[in-house]
Amino acid sequence: MAAPGEAATDLEVIRGKRAALFFAAVAILLGLPLWWKTTETYRAPLPYSQISGLNALQLRLTVRVTVVFTRESVPLDDQEKLPFTVVHEREIPLKYKMKIKCRFQKAYRRALEREEEALSLGSMQEAETMLAEPQEQAEGSLTVYVISENSSLLPQDMMSYIGPERTAVVRGITHREAFHIVGRRVIQVAQAMSLTEDVLAAALADHLPEDKWSSDKRRPLKSSLGYEITFSLLNPDPKSHDVHWDIEGAVRRYVQPFLSALSAAGNFSVDSQILYYAVLGVNPRFDPASSSYYLAAHSLPHVINPVESRLGSSAASLYPVLNFLLYVPELAHSPLYIQDKDGAPVATNAFHSPRWGGIMVYNVDPKAYNGSELPVRVEVDMVRVMEVFLAQLRLLFGIGQPQIPLKCLFSGPKSEGLTIWELDRLLWARSVENVATATTTLTSLAQLLGKISNIVIKDDVASEVYRAVAAVQKAAEELAAGHLASAFTASQEAVTSSERAFFDPSLLHLLYFPDDQKFAIYIPLFLPMAVPILLSLVKIFLETRKSWKKPEKRD
């Protein structure tokens, strides 16, 4: 019979084993899952499959063209076939992962009585005025009027006409292949007024290989919700020149109408400043033959950086800043001219830098120094200056000279300095650029989150990603339907949401929290508690194993 002391000892041993097993069970079954759940990185689900599908997205840009035939523009047999629709589609040959097709949907119909009357007038301006009165076309659409082959509305040596509105005129032909010949002329005019390979290449310049396009294709500004324009007068020699410029009146008369016409592409803010003792970073060279100074073409890039440090306009700006500088050279370096690559003087005496702005050198008339005391009062000819700055502004936004077909009469823009179809063409390019930028941003974000597992993905970030994906898909659908205004709006939303998700600060909270830091934090916390429990479990296991192997005593 066992002694009472031994029985008490065995009871304590059993109680200790049970306590150790209980602590181990609590730590493993409750503590470990609770710790795992409370310390895991929260990652909201993202549409990875939809994001990967955006790279294979095929953009189809549909331009709706209404072709209106007047009497005697085509043979009577062909006129009886009206109305009908013809679709002309071609792929834009760009080395880009996203396939882009341009689709011209031509709706042929007969001219109305009012249109017949307008196109029978004596001049194209009168006809345009009468045609535009009750007509309001959708953004991105075109109307091409086909007039008689012998019509006097156009000069006899001209086959087509492109106006400032969304309308054009082409000559018809009395030929059995009339529809085929007129269709080709319509396509040529429609391409010049809407989409060309160069326009799309400039829009996708940041996404195409470097060797595919020259640096001239990279002139346009990147798409943005807003732009800031700063006009600066640089007077490095105020002791010799008392310069006055009516910048407020010039902006009101010349710049504001252009920006108002361009308001669909973004918001604009304009300011001005005068900087004294601001010199160029390059010393001009003297030309003895002309007794003047000049800046060579290879030295122009070195002019911008020293001057830019004095501007101070882009430091606190949320939007791209365009700088337009009017430089009045000091008396010691007057007159000053800018030379091109061939050494010839530039007619405008100005140059521009892509995505930055432009600089114009304004020389003081030498007659102003005759019998005048210093400083000489200088009144800037703002008409000449604004002609240069507006031309540079058009180039910076990618609104260059259109590629007009042969024997085509082009009337040019109105007083705003911008035709309506040039604005449509800019919106086409911006829509494609926004879709490409949003797709690239979403793809990069998905790859980043897939590679780094400890980045937190909050619900608001995920909602921005879902919103961006939906906006890209909607923009592609609207482009295919020919709805330019809604497509541009959706593309802007796609860029805004994708960049808001990509640059969300919460993505960086645990980005620099590697595994070795986790071990350094958790080992001092869990090791003192885990070692006694593990040793107790090992001891219990060994004693249990020993008891199993111990032979039973037989009487």
Image (tube, helix red, strand yellow):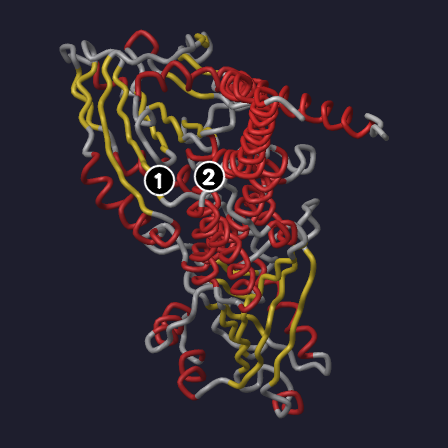
Residue at 45% over, 38% down: 396
How crowded pointer 2 is (Cα within 10 Å; few <14, some 14-19, many 20+) is rated as some
Q: Which mark is residue 221?
A: 2
Q: How far apart are the two marked residues, 2 and 1, measured between alpha carbons?
A: 10 Å
Residue 157 in view, yes or no: no
Residue at numbered disc 1: 227
The secondary structure type at the circle numbered 2 is loop
The secondary structure type at the circle numbered 1 is strand
> Which residue occupies the foreground of this view, 214 or 538?
538
* Above/below status of 513 relative to 173: above
Name the image quarter holding residue 314. Answer: top left
**Which is nearer the N-term, disc 2 or disc 1?**
2
Determine whether label 2 and label 1 are within 8 Å by CB.
yes
Residue at 56% over, 55% down: 404
In the orientation shown, which residue stands out farthest toward the left? 373
Q: Residue 406: percent from the left, percent from the top? A: 61, 57
* Above/below status of 507 relative to 310: below
